[in-house]
Amino acid sequence: HHTIDPVVLKTFPRWYYLEQHTQPTCAICMEEFIPACLMRTLPCLHHFHVDCIDRWLLEESSECPSCKTDFGCG
């Protein structure tokens, strides 16, 4: 599997979850998002717990776990 460059990962925005957001669970750990948890949004607009998606992209795969969009560089 290809993984993502940490420099690229840092360009994906981080933010704190608010209850108004519609995606209720993390597709990686399957746990519900709770208010004030730190999130990351990928360019495909899927959201994950920052710890879950960072570990996924750095160690498992350069693809979004939800839609398989590849963020690797080649």
Image: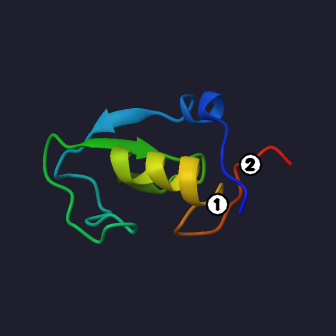
Q: Earlier in the sequence, mark 1 or mark 2?
A: 1
**Front-most of residues 13 and 52:** 52
**Front-most of residues 59 and 36:** 59
User: Residue drawn at (60%, 33%), measured in percent from left and top?
Assistant: 6
Q: Where in the figure is residue 7, as x and y percent of width and height? A: 63, 27
Marks 1 & 2, CB-CB < 8 Å contact: yes
Instruction: Estimate the spatial distance between the alpha carbons at disc 1 and disc 2, rounded to whole Å.
Output: 7 Å
Kind of residue sitting beneath label 1: Glu
Q: Where in the figure is residue 4, as x and y percent of width and height? A: 66, 45
Badge 2: how crowded within 10 Å, few (<14), some, or many (20+)?
A: some
Q: Is residue 34 visible?
A: yes
User: Residue drawn at (46%, 50%), measured in percent from left and top?
Assistant: 55
**Residue under label 1:** 63
Kind of residue sitting beneath label 2: Gly
Position above or below: 7 against 30:
above
Q: Where in the figure is residue 54, as x and y percent of width and height? A: 46, 45
SS state under label 1:
loop
User: Residue drawn at (50%, 56%), measured in percent from left and top?
Assistant: 56
Q: Which mark, residue 72?
A: 2
In the image, 74: left or right of 43? right
Q: Where in the figure is residue 65, as x and y percent of width and height? A: 53, 67
In the image, 70: left or right of 21? right
